[in-house]
Each structure stands twice: as structure tokens, then as C-alpha cells.
Amino acid sequence: MPPQQAGAAMTPMPVCLTLGSILNSAIVVKLKRPGAMLGIGFVLLLTCFIGLNQVDAGTSGWRLGMPLASAGLGLGLLLNNLNVFGQQIVGKARYGIFTALMQSTRMTGGMIGTAALGAWVATAADSPARLVDALLQGFNVVGVMVPIALLLLRALPPITHSRQP
């Protein structure tokens, strides 16, 4: 796939991330149990990893873009909610500490994940076919982590809206 086509195939992810965030902001305030949005976000991420597992070297751009659109929507539902719900759990006195911890953890996890996947691909990718196999193995590992996150989500205390008159 040429670079222009690969870039076009990636475009649905950031576009859908923005759309997911906007939709989430409109929907989450109307729900009695807003924590359900986290579950929906994780399910959309799982859908992405299942879709990416079907990708091979000859996959067309739109077949690559559809799972990435699902990931964008899922992340749009997750990222803001994780911050807001976490702040609600820790209380006003610890907003700043929690937000800094959340951002630092997200950034560090992204760096470690990128380095690990890069090292995995670099050691396994001596041909384009082996590169695709290495990426699929990486997606499978991350795809296993999403159901674990869904199970951990059930352990969170119930999150409700605090309504002010």
C-alpha cells in the first residue's frame, strides 16, 4: 500500500475519535449509569482488534479503515470518561494529583507500548509477510487485554451524576 493510501486508511481513527468524544459529551450526561459508556468504548476497541486480526498485506484501505474507525469511536468514549470518572471517585481535593497521574500513566504506557511493539516487529520482520504476522501477534496480545479491562471495569464503584440545583 502506498504511503498516501495508508494515510487515507488511518484517517478514520482520529476523525472518529473526535466524533466519539463529541457524542460522548452529549450522551453521558443523560445516562443514569454513565459508567456503561466505558464498557461500550472497550467493546468498540475489542471490535477493532478483531477487525485488525483479519488484515493481511493485500488488505484494501477501507477494510483497514473500518476497524480503525471503531478504535477511534471507542477511544472517544473512553479517554474523557476515564478522567472525569476518576476525578469523581478521588474527590475535589485530589483532582490535580489524579489528573497528573492519569496523564503521566497514559504517556508512559504509550511510550512503553510503542517501544515494545517496535522491538517485537524489528526482531520478527525480515520480510513483509513476517512484518504483518508480527503486527497481528501484537494486536492479539492487546486484544486479550481489552476483555481483562472490561472485567476490571465491573470492580469499579458505581458512578452517578452529582446534580447541582
Image (tube, rainbow, N blue to C red):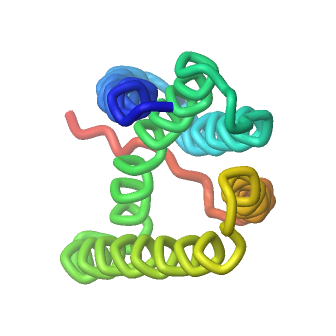
Question: In the picture shown, does residue 139 fall above or below 50?
Answer: below
The residue at the point 24 percent across, 72 percent down is 95
Can I make out residue 149 in this image? no
Q: Residue 147: image x %, image y %?
A: 79, 54
Q: Is residue 116 left or right of residue 109?
A: right
Q: Residue 140: image x %, image y %?
A: 78, 57
Q: Residue 136: image x %, image y %?
A: 74, 53
Q: Is residue 152 left or right of residue 15?
A: right
The residue at the point 68 percent across, 59 percent down is 127
Question: In the picture shown, does residue 76 fall above or below 134?
Answer: above
Q: Residue furthest top?
A: 62
The residue at the point 41 percent across, 48 percent down is 81
| Quadrant the C terminus occupies | top left
Q: Is residue 102 left or right of residue 75?
A: left
| Nearer to me, 152 or 141 | 141
Question: In the picture shown, does residue 30 fall above or below 124?
Answer: above
Q: Quadrant of residue 138?
A: bottom right
Can I make out residue 95 in this image? yes
The residue at the point 31 percent across, 80 percent down is 104
